[in-house]
Amino acid sequence: MNVNQKYVWNHEKQIERFNHLGMPEQLTVELSNHCNLDCLKCNYSDLKRRKGLMSRELFLKIINDNTIDKIDRLGLSNMGEPLMHPEVCEYINLANKTGKFGRIHFATNAVLLDEGMSNRLLDAGLGAVKLSLDFVDRKNYLKLNKRDHFDAVEKNIKTFCKIKKHGNYDCNTMLKVTLYEYTDEIAEGLIQRWKEHVDFIRISKVHSWVGGDIGNLSSGIRSIPCQYLFCTLHILWDGRVTLCCYDKEGYLSVGTIRDYSIYDIWNNHSKLNAIRQKHLKLDFSNLKMCEFCDSERYVDIVRYPE
Ligand code: SF4
């Protein structure tokens, strides 16, 4: 097991990246901020921003943006459960057909990932999936997720992985476990139980959201610039562009994608560029949410295979 890996900030590389931004490595598009669970880690029932689904018109505007040549990854989840969008498979198919995105992926709690859904997603061209499984047994599942889907979720994950293997689909499967209390025994148990089913297992500890609304888990002030500003563009279901997936309420929104092309907002947006410059100088004045954000400490405790 690879324990306590730390993200290493390469200042020269990031400045170089800033000077030649071009396009984000990943575009994250929130299809839905509805959710069918109420997990402690998200505190979803306290989500204040309006709930909704990304419209087809807006999704098409994003994926058909003619300033995009190629983007490595298109993520379709942010806050909320992507499978609650009734057109998720069709949207994946549409994005695939553009040929502009390397891998299309999302994270799911797997409650709705039944056999039919699994087949449709894989046929549509889903390229990777993070299967969130933040529990080790039924008792824990109920405590952390406040719904009783334990059996269904285990079954769904195994079924999805089986269909993927038998159909030889090019889709990476990752079991993503967020623990409140980590022990080597728990990690080892999870690996033994799941290694024959999924391609990768990642275990990390819970992080805090910007605005600190699940408690003060942050353990200090930032010491490095934030990588999200240099690699990922996040678009909420209503079109607002924000800085990162830590911003569950959209407090850090810099505008709406309805008013910009992907290239323009990524390269020429004065507010976004000013935030990047401040990060590079480690100047977080007027950026309090970034200053106390714990994203730099949110690293995998376990990566399997290493
Ligand atoms: S430092 Fe935190 S709040 Fe700021 S952009 Fe990065 S992840 Fe988001």
Image: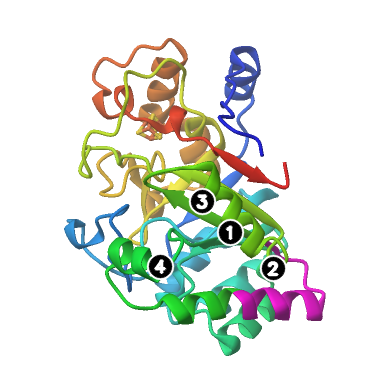
Q: Which residue is mark 3?
A: 186
Which is nearer the N-term, disc 1 or disc 2?
Answer: 1
Label 4 Cα neighbours within 10 Å, binned few <14 / some 14-19 / many ≥20: many
| Image location (x, y in percent) of residue 166 | 80, 80
Q: Are marks 1 and 2 in contact (CB under 8 Å)?
A: yes
Mark 4 or 2: in front is 2
What secondary structure characterizes most of the magenta part?
A: helix
Which is nearer the N-term, disc 4 or disc 1?
Answer: 4
Q: Which mark is residue 197?
A: 2
Which is nearer the N-term, disc 3 or disc 1?
Answer: 1
| On screen, residue 173 above or below 24 | below
Q: Secondary structure at mark 3?
A: helix
- Give the residue type that dot 3 points to: Ile
- Give the residue type that dot 2 points to: His
Q: Is mark 2 within 8 Å of ligand 1?
A: no
Q: Which residue is mark 1?
A: 175
| Image location (x, y in percent) of residue 33 | 33, 64
- Give the residue type that dot 4 points to: Glu
In space, the residues marked 4 and 1 are separated at their CA atoms by 16 Å
Q: Secondary structure at mark 4?
A: loop
Q: Which mark is residue 260?
A: none
Camera-side residue of 174 and 229: 174
Q: Residue 145 is drawn in which quadrant? A: bottom left
Mark 3 or 1: in front is 3
Q: Residue 210 is drawn in which quadrant? A: top left
Q: Which residue is mark 4?
A: 81
